[in-house]
Image (tube, rainbow, N blue to C red):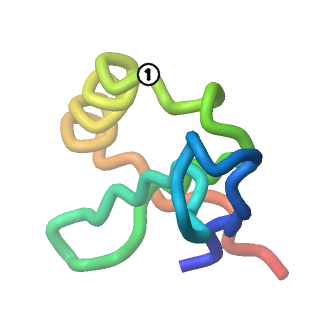
């Protein structure tokens, strides 16, 4: 999924590797419409903003972006 993997900073934090935050929004055609991947725990996406974006995408039939190689 392309998530960043981190080791714990201390034994109090957690006892194993873990993934940093990531969010994938899949549209009704089962294609990934939005990707938000972070390499830090405090850079999580704003879920209210994401929900507004999803509504906009659905209402305006907004295309998937960033597909040029």
Tell me what residue is drawn at x 29 percent, y 65 percent: 26
Counting from the top left corner in percent of width and height, residue 21 is at 53, 49
Q: Nearer the viewer, residue 11 or 3?
A: 11
Quarter of the rendering containing residue 27: bottom left
Q: Which residue is mark 1?
A: 46
x and y, in percent, of residue 57 in the image = 32, 40
Picture quarter with the C terminus: bottom right
> Label 1: how many residues lie within 10 Å, few (<14), some (14-19) or many (20+)?
few
Quadrant of the rendered image containing residue 5 = bottom right
Q: Could you tell me which residue is drawn at 61 percent across and 69 percent down? A: 17
Q: Residue furthest front?
A: 11
- Tell me the SS state at disc 1: loop
Q: Is residue 62 above or below residue 24?
A: above
Reply above or below: 38 against 43: below
- Residue at point 41%, 69% (across, down): 32
Q: Is residue 36 left or right of residue 47?
A: right
| Front-most of residues 32 and 64 | 32
**Position of residue 61 in the picture relative to residue 23 (left or right):** left
Q: Residue furthest left?
A: 28
Q: Nearer the viewer, residue 22 or 30?
A: 22
């Amino acid at each position: 999924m392309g998530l960043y993997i981190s080791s714990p900073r201390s034994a109090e934090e957690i006892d194993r590797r873990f993934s940093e935050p990531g969010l994938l929004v899949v549209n009704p055609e089962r294609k990934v419409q939005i990707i938000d991947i972070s390499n830090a725990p405090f850079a999580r996406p704003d879920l209210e903003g994401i929900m507004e974006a999803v509504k906009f995408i659905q209402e305006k039939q907004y295309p998937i972006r960033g597909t040029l190689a």
